[in-house]
Image (cartoon, rainbow, N blue to C red):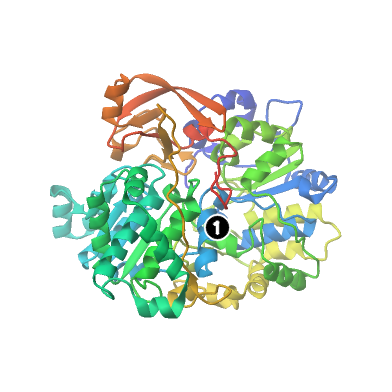
Amino acid sequence: EATTRRVSSEFFVEHSRSRLAQQSDQWLNAQGRLTEPMVLDSSSDHYRPISWEDAFRLVGQSLQALSSPDEAVFYSSGRTSNEAAFLYGLLARSLGTNNLPDCSDMCHEPSVRALREVIGHDGPTVRLEDFYRADLILVVGQNPGSNHPRMLDALEQARANGARVISLNPLPEAGLIRFKNPRALVHPIKAFNLLMGEGTPMCDLHLPVRIGGDVAVFKGMLKALLEREEERPNSVFDHHFLGEHTRGYAHFVDDLREQSWSEILRSSGLSRDLIERAAEMVARSRRIIISWAMGITQQPHAIANIQQMVNLLLVRGCFGKPGAGLCPLAGHSNLQGVRRAGITERPDGEFLRALGQEFGFTPPLAHGYDVVEAIAAMEAGKVKTFIGLGGNFAVASPDSRRTAEALARCQLTVQISTKLNRSHLVCGQQALILPTLGRTEIDRKATGPQFVTVEDALGRVHATRGHLEPASPNLMSEVAILAGLAQASLPQSRITWKAFSEDYDRIRHHLGQVVPSLRNFNYRARRKGGFYPVNPPREGRFETADGKAHFTVHPVPPESAGPGQFLLMSIRAHDQFNTTIYRPDDRYRGIFNQRKVVLANPQDLVEQGFRQGQQVDITSHFQGTRRSLTGFAIVPYSIPRGCLVCYFPEANALAPLEAVAHGANTP
């Protein structure tokens, strides 16, 4: 956001949409900050300036002309604030739709559904200080060195306090092998060790699981723990906790007894010795944290993965005590916050009743579209207007060609953005770019500078205030843009939209009235350091129907790759953040100046007759359909046999829209 480069109306005179579409995502991002509203007409290949008033009128006319409110989709990114998210949901529901897909549909929706079912809570159950008190931390399906670098600080301190770390990942990630903490530079002795030493070892045991083998790994660990428990009763399982706080234990144990080791080893790709070593570390630890990210959730068996991790913590009684619990890590800074503020296509009845009572209207009850359903609906011509509050929908979504064709069928697409991205080019028949203030910029109103709130990865809600001058005097805040859109779209509404844009305390007041965990929001938001909403599992309480945590039973998934086929997963490089590409490098993996690469096991390459650097085509197979990409360079890498790795989002075109997590619809 702090870049000095600017994308003005003159830029769009020089660059047509067609020409811009030929540029890389890195190039688009590097052009700088958007500075004024722009519109692309169906008869033109160039964006042109449009006033804010005319832009709002255009969107209002589009929404008012719909045959049904469900012909509009309101997509949002986790980078937005709680205040903007609440206003966005209020706008959509005042219009009459719950079509509020968001980026969590493509990442942590399985976490939400899996955890709600078994512990009655859909977020983390630990705080940062719990890492410092843990005996054992499992880092699963993630690369904190690139995607959550602050987590390495916590892991380093945890290890200094005696914790051990297990990494479960097809790839050995550099940040989990050794870590040199740049914070040490401020301390003379530590700085010397940082510069001259090899770094701090971060991982005690690495489990190079086969892609998709996570259910088998955790089931193997649980089976090994059960065998130890049956040899020496009460030595491993916390039977007091199990009796007081859980349901389904007997069925869960019966399933473990019947599970064959051969199936576990086949699916996981690991040796029994490795799994039993991990189980021994679990058995010797009283306080265990399991942290995971998209390597676990973007799988067909995502919910099963997560619920097996819950099973592991349940048998050890790792809820309701310091240094223990669950930690789903999101890629965006406010993923949990926007969900709490009402951004979901499946709102619960209690939230809708409170919202309707607070604002004097009847919100729609029918579920709306999630991301996958929204793309399918656009593809079918059922969506006329698409609005994106942040993010880069065209690039983040699966099945890139179909997503582009779906967006092109919309009559109007609107993107509320800070910088240029491909979603401004892969658009509807008419397109709007509405440039917004970044969170680091001062948001001045007549009532004074405004602040907004976000909820961090560990559930802490806190205020955030901009300190930089806006990139352009013609920018508006997300809240002001949404208020303007609402006024233009709902002229008969009794809701005082303009008042919200003048003083964000008014939004927080209503948000606190609607969401019980945010009561007295304005007061609590001003606390130094923020506050934590109530977290029942952290206190040893489970808000399920029967007040108990539930064991679940999941089979080891069958083999999914056919003869001669590989399993492919996508990852992010170090020099990118989600869809934003800063440089074409991945320094920790030794890859530079290229992103169209495929990482493969060296033995597989020898057997298949491939060589390093060779250009290959990649074809995905799903339910009789094929999708192909060309020109990927082979990179030998330490990865389980039969597995391949490409970068996100380059590989998205290979992911079918219909390939989703069972029970969560996550691509």
Amino acid carrying label 1: it is: Ile
Give the side of residue 414 with respect to residue 300, left or right: right
Residue 221 figure quarter = bottom left
Q: Position of residue 597 (x, y in %)?
A: 38, 28
Residue wearing tag 1? 442
Q: Is residue 637 above or below residue 248?
A: above
Q: Is residue 401 above or below residue 631?
A: below
Instruction: Name the quadrant of the C terminus.
Output: top right
Question: Front-most of 13 and 589?
Answer: 589
Question: Front-most of 522 and 634?
Answer: 634
Q: Is residue 179 visible?
A: no
Give the side of residue 183 with respect to residue 241, left or right: left
- Which residue is painted at 38% across and 39% down in the image? 573
Q: Position of residue 261 (x, y in %)?
A: 32, 51
Residue 71 figure quarter = top right
Q: Is residue 68 above or below residue 544?
A: above
- Which residue is painted at 37% across and 44% down in the image? 267
User: SS at mark 1?
Assistant: loop
